[in-house]
Image (cartoon, rainbow, N blue to C red):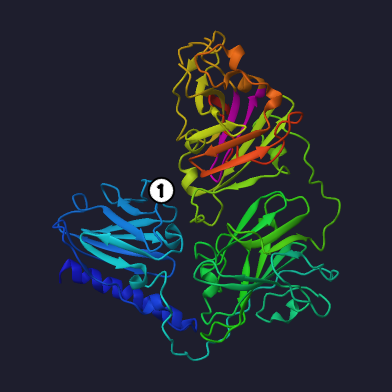
Amino acid sequence: MSRWNRNRLCTAARRGAVAAMALTLGLAPVPYITREAIALASADASVLSWDATFDGSSYVFTIDFANDVYSGNHYLAVSYDDGTQGNANSLQLTWDCSEVKGGYYQDIPGASTSISGNTVTVGVPASYFGGKSFTVTYCGSSITSAQMGGASVAPDTPTTPDEPETPATPSEPATPETPATPGEPETGGSADTPTGAYAGIAIDGDFSDWDAVAKADTDATVGWGHVNRMAMVWDGDWVYLYLESVDSNPASMTGAGPSGNGKFAITTDLGNQTLVDLCQAPNRVLGIDGATIAANSTTWGQPPYRWEVAIPASALGPYSKTISFGLYRQDAAIKDVANLRASGDEDHTFSGITYDGSYDDWTYYPHTTIQYAGSGTGETVVDARGALYADADKLYGHVVTSMPAHLSEAGGEFASAVSLKLNDDENLMLTPRFVAVDANGNIDWNPQTSGLAAGTYEFYLASTTTNGTSANINDLKDDDVIYGHAMVTISADKDEMEYVIDIPTLAAHLHAGGGQDKAETSIDPSSITKFSAQYGRIGQEWVTTAGTSTAPVLGVGLCLAAVGGTYAYRRRGSRR
């Protein structure tokens, strides 16, 4: 049997297994399950043929090379029906096909490759394509996302399967004494009027206990799936979520959101987000230990479909008093929900920042989500979160990430592609440089900044524009300016950094006329009313924070990462 035919049989078997699983769960086969991959001819002698299909969450490309995976065509062009241009306009295999990269050769979160002989299988999450209709062209042949069974495919009319067995009832979270009826939260749309007295929520597929809870009419039409109503109750140690869709597809809510990936978020009033990934619902919630879910039905063509989800409150990020809920990367639909059983003796106050590498004092200071992919993360956690705080003449920054792709850089995600801008003035911009200084004050202008072992390191902060000719920190030349310090902690499950910058030093040296006398071009520190930052290895967007001339920049923002230098000996032992 030829390698091509073996590959086709494996593909057919895999799809047959998916279809069988769907029928076991009582779901009519959705379009991507019933479609076979389309074999496409190749005009390139290095490639025998290729095909593409959609498996429900990712687009899968199978390439059969003629000789070996090293010498074949590794470039797939992507064009969008709406003319979108950018970093998602191609897919590029590395020289050995061990990875697939985006159009700007950036990493694609959640993407994968596998090699069997001369056959390479590439999986790319649907989120990479932003939920848009597109066409892939490779080796002289093209296929649309609709032909693959993905974006812009109208569901085939299904045959209604036999009624499935009732799924096992998820364990019910322990419910203490009955609280008062929850107040009606602020919502992003109209809300219905609750009826009856609230007596707690049980995750059992019986939705009568939700009658006493106000529901927001969200009419969410982003993505290929829909959520028409939402509700949330925070009851002691559990947060309960209600979702409803009137689509005919019982899995519609798994495709809700701007990327069509079923990602929602609980956001605290301090800006910390917990991802609620429902792409595998109503069977499970990804990424949150202890979460349970139940549905009223999984039978095709019998809307409305209702899901109820229990999230342990321990999964929430730091908060002051309230939380909100909605689609990830969208405005919250349910806002400012307080805990019905709040004890009242919790101390969630912010008391200022001490630069010491312990990070605890940042816990109750507002943070903002930093997201690399504009269409949303491909992981079950947000990319990162960061904050900025100014006190007197010091600027403090904080950033932390637990995303696996960033953790693999082990410090490198904090050390490059960072820009700091003052007052929206392109002439007042700092790009940082990490500089190492040993115990004797000797400077290493090009130290190791990525692949660091677990532990905490301290760094001096300089600029990428410095000449870097000074040999010792105690004998700096005029152009070798040190702006502050940073501490970076590397551990198994998160990387974290805080830094401090001297604002007068920043104001004195970020001047427009590089060759002019500093006294003529320096700015008054009190005139700094806005900091903006772009932290390219973690997020492409500019993040800003504003203040006044008497209180410079007290607020939320990206860790402006003017984190130039490094005191690169180990400050502490491993913090795994």
- Is any atom of residue 187 visible in this view? yes
Expressed as whole percent of the image width and height from the top left, the position of residue 314 reads: 69, 56
Residue 309 percent coordinates (x, y): 65, 70
Crowdedness of circle 1 by 10 Å Cα count: few (<14), some, many (20+)? some
| Foreground residue among 427 and 463 | 427
Q: Amino acid at mark 1?
A: Asp
Task: Please report the residue visible at 78 percent of the width from the left and 53 percent of the height from the top.
Answer: 321
The magenta stretch is 484-503
Secondary structure predominantly adopted by residues drawn in magenta: strand
The residue carrying mark 1 is 107
- Quarter of the image for residue 114 reads bottom left
Magenta run includes residue 353: no
Choose between 508 and 303: the one closer to the eye: 508
237 up-or-down from 146: above or below: above
Residue ranking furthest to the left: 45
For image coordinates 40% across by 66% down, the residue present is 133
Task: Give residue 99's position: percent from left, percent from top.
Answer: 34, 51
Residue at position x 33%, y 64% from top?
135
- Side of 360 relative to 138 (left or right): right
